[in-house]
Structure formats: structure tokens, C-alpha cells
Image (tube, grey):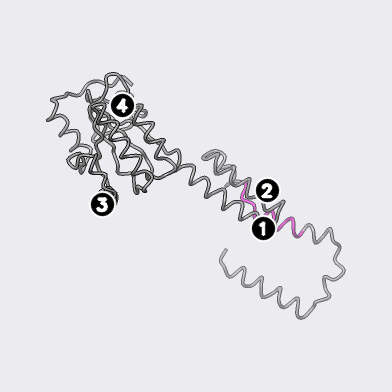
Amino acid sequence: RTQLTGVVGAVLIVLMLVLVPGLFRDLPQPALAAVVITASLSLADLPGSVRLWRQSRTEFLLCCAAFAGVALLGVLPGIAIAVALSVLNVFRRAWWPYRTVLGRVPDLEGYHDVRSYPQARQLPGLVIYRFDAPLFFANARAFRDEIRRLAATDPRPAWIVIAAEPMTDVDTTAADVLEDLDEALNAAGVHLVFAEMKDPVRRKIERFELTRTIDPDHFFPTVGAAVAAFRRLTGAEWTDGDR
């Protein structure tokens, strides 16, 4: 039940190899195979694999790929395959992150996913959008396309507020995409607004000189502050959600 078990087993194996090296010389190969198979089965975590199948099919497939790699190619190549697939899975999640529109739910503080709360209320002329990943070269165009889609809805929103707390980074490619996107939105009468952006990311935005197109006054510490500013500017009132 403790790590001492392994120590005792290792000591006994060493003593057997030193003191009675010929004891297992004539042991039949089927008996040795049974020992190896039994030891291998003890390493398998079947309940854990079943749990992965129930909770995350992607991680279950990674588990199967790691097992197949070790069984067919060897331990080191199998582990390398498992690590590479895991890294690709992380990249996939960043490439196609979860994104959603937020709304205000009666009797519930904050702003919440309209998919989880279809009754969420919206402000006419305002869209609150959350993109749950750092903004970088792989997903910047997906972000741009989604914002363009939101800006093209009828009636056209005046502000698109980005709930930017999940955005932990912005790279140069994403900065270029943001600049072009903001210029196109401004030409259409739509303003791109950021709320809850982390200070290091905000400093990057300023270093990339994006405030040439993005109004410096369109950065707010919270989503609530952005919503309050929009309401003061337009006099908009909350409406019942229709999503």
C-alpha cells in the first residue's frame, strides 16, 4: 500500500539475481509470458478508460492512440505520438474556441451565455460577445468573421462589446486583423468596444498602435461599465431576449 512495496520487491529481485541466478534458467516461456501479461494488465486502467469515454470522447481517443502507439511501435514512439496528439488537441481548442453572445438574466447578477439562458435580455443596438481564447494567428480570422456576422444582423448594432477577459494574449497577426476589422466596422457605423481586457493585453494593443483606429474611450474595466456607457449615450432599455 506504500512505496516501500516497490523497494522490497527491487531488493528481492537483486538478491535472487546475485544469489540464485540459475533458479529460473529452465522456466518455460509460457510461464514467463504469463508473468509479463499479468504485469501488463496491472498497468491498464480500464475503469479510467471507461470514465474517459463517458466524460470526454476526445481524451478517450487520445488514450487509444497512445495505447496503439506503444503496442505497435514501442514505448518511446508511442509516448511521442501521445504527446504530439495532445499538443494538437490543445491547438485545436485554441483554433476553434467557444464563443457566444451574452445577455442579462433577470434575478441573476452579471451577463450570461444566451445559449444557456435563452430568456436573457438584450439592449437594442448592443451586442456583447465573448471569445474564450487568446487572439492569435490561427483564430484571428475566425474572430473577424464572427464579428462581421454580428455586425451584419438586422437591425445593425451600434456597439459590439467584446468581453475580453478570456483573451490572455494578442499577437501581431491578430493585431493587423483587428485594425482592418475596426476600420471596416467604423465605415459601417459600428463601433468595436472592449471590456475587462487584462492590462498586459491592453499594453500590447497600445504598443501595436491599434488605438489609431480603436477609440481609446472604448476600453472599459467591466462589461457593466460598457453597458452603462452605451445606455447613457443612447438611452436604450433592456428588452426580452428572443433567442
Residue 64 on image: x %, y %: 63, 45
Task: Give yes or no for contact between labels 1 and 3 (Cβ–Cβ under 8 Å).
Answer: no
Task: Give yes or no for contact between labels 3 and 2 (Cβ–Cβ under 8 Å).
Answer: no
Disc sitting over residue 151 in the figure: 4
The mark closer to the camera, 2 or 4, is 4
Q: Tell which circle, 1 or 3, labels the residue nearer the N-terminal end.
A: 1
Amino acid type of disc 2? Ala
How much space separates mark 1 and mark 3, taking CA atoms? 45 Å
Residue at x 48% of width, y 46% of height: 91
Residue at x 16% of width, y 24% of height: 236
Q: Tell which circle, 4 or 3, labels the residue nearer the N-terminal end.
A: 4
Residue topped by disc 2 = 68
Q: Secondary structure at mark 1?
A: helix
Q: Tell which circle, 2 or 4, labels the residue nearer the N-terminal end.
A: 2
Residue topped by disc 1 = 75
Q: Which residues are magenta?
A: 35-46
How much space separates mark 3 and mark 2, taking CA atoms? 46 Å
Q: Secondary structure at mark 3?
A: helix
Amino acid type of disc 3? Arg
Left or right: 129 as drawn, with respect to 107:
right
How much space separates mark 2 and mark 4, taking CA atoms? 47 Å
Residue lying furthest bottom in this view?
19
Number of residues whose C-alpha sits closer than 10 Å to that of mark 2, classed few (under 14), some (14–19) or many (20 or more) = some
Q: Tell which circle, 3 or 2, labels the residue nearer the N-terminal end.
A: 2
Q: Tell which circle, 1 or 4, labels the residue nearer the N-terminal end.
A: 1
Residue at x 30% of width, y 31% of height: 184
In the image, is residue 43 part of the stretch drawn in magenta?
yes
Q: Secondary structure at mark 2?
A: helix
Residue 132 position (above or below residue 116)? below
Residue 159 on image: x %, y %: 23, 30
Number of residues whose C-alpha sits closer than 10 Å to that of mark 4, classed few (under 14), some (14–19) or many (20 or more) = many
Residue topped by disc 3 = 203
